[in-house]
Image: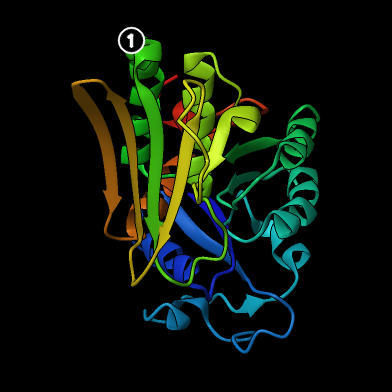
Amino acid sequence: MIRTTVIGAAGRMGRILVTLIQADEALQLAGAVEYAGSPFLGQDAGVVAGLAPAGVPIVSSLADVLPQTDAVIDFSTPESTLAAAPQVVAAGASMVIGSTPLKAEHRAALKALSEHGGRLMAAPNMSVGVNLLFALCAKVAPILGEDFDIEVVEMHHNRKKDAPSGTAVRLGEILAEASGRDYERDAVHGRHGLVGARTRREIGMHALRGGDVVGDHTVIFAADGERVELTHKASSRETFAKGALRAVKFLATARAGLYDMQDVLGLR
């Protein structure tokens, strides 16, 4: 069994991860970590997740649980991830990272750790469907060509703090690469006022927030006379947690390296 530790075990995603790990015959819950000062410290991770006691207390120190850990799952913040990753690699464990938004410098730091024996998987979205959307966009954009304008629209719940979502940014990056554009230069984040006619190179990025939407992403390819739309809608956070567990199992037999969900799902 793969002994698995969850960072952020008392959060919404952490509780789902604990539940799915407890139900998976290939995995064992080895540790549960929360921030110092969390009201859940000392409580049983299984009970916090609404299950029977798991015999795993929630602690504030990752170092305390690493000796009995094979894999760590982290859906926290980039700063927290970069603080934890060197400890995980030094302990010989693998790490599945769902923190967003990871910037180029964050990925560079993770890449450096992978070159020193780290087995890491980082993805802005671990949904199988979203990663299929990534692969489809990479194929569709060059086929449709420059006659089609590209717009990305995402919607999330009203408590989401970052915009655009990490998934939308990744879609923009993939679309830019596949269509010969540069994301940093050509992405246009919303439009307001007299902005002038749309240029051919623009990739429009639009973030909507409201209600309890888990995550909707649509890529629009629009030309004169026709339009192609690719959409993914997530109705449960379980889809992200299930992808994370697939990544844990993938890393268990993987060589050192920095991977993403395209590798895990064999879509690359």
The quarter of the picture where residue 264 lies is top left
Against 75, is 225 above or below?
A: above
Colour setup of the view = rainbow
Residue type of the residue flagged with mark 1: Ile
Residue at 41 percent across and 20 percent down: it is 138
Q: Residue at x 45, y 77 (%)?
A: 46
Query: Split into 4 quadrants, where in the image is the C terminus?
Result: top left
Q: Position of residue 73 (x, y in %)?
A: 57, 54
Whether residue 123 can be seen here: no
Q: Quadrant of residue 69?
A: bottom right
Please determine whether, in this image, residue 193 is positioned above or below residue 201: below
Among all residues in the image, which is located at the extreme bottom? 39
Return the residue found at the far left: 225
**Residue 92 visible in the current orientation:** yes
Q: Estimate the x, y position of residue 248 in percent, counting from the top left.
A: 50, 43
Q: In this image, 223 relative to 199: left or right?
A: left
Q: How many marks?
A: 1
The residue indicated by pointer 1 is 143
Q: Nearer the viewer, residue 188 or 83?
A: 188
Q: Whole-percent x and y of residue 195?
A: 52, 41
Mark 1 Cα-neighbour bin, 10 Å: few <14, some 14–19, many ≥20: few
For residue 257, side relative to residue 234 (left or right) = right
Q: Nearer the viewer, residue 23 or 99?
A: 99
Q: Is residue 96 above or below residue 220?
A: below
Query: What is the secondary structure assignment of the residue under circle 1?
Result: helix
Q: Nearer the viewer, residue 54 or 152?
A: 152
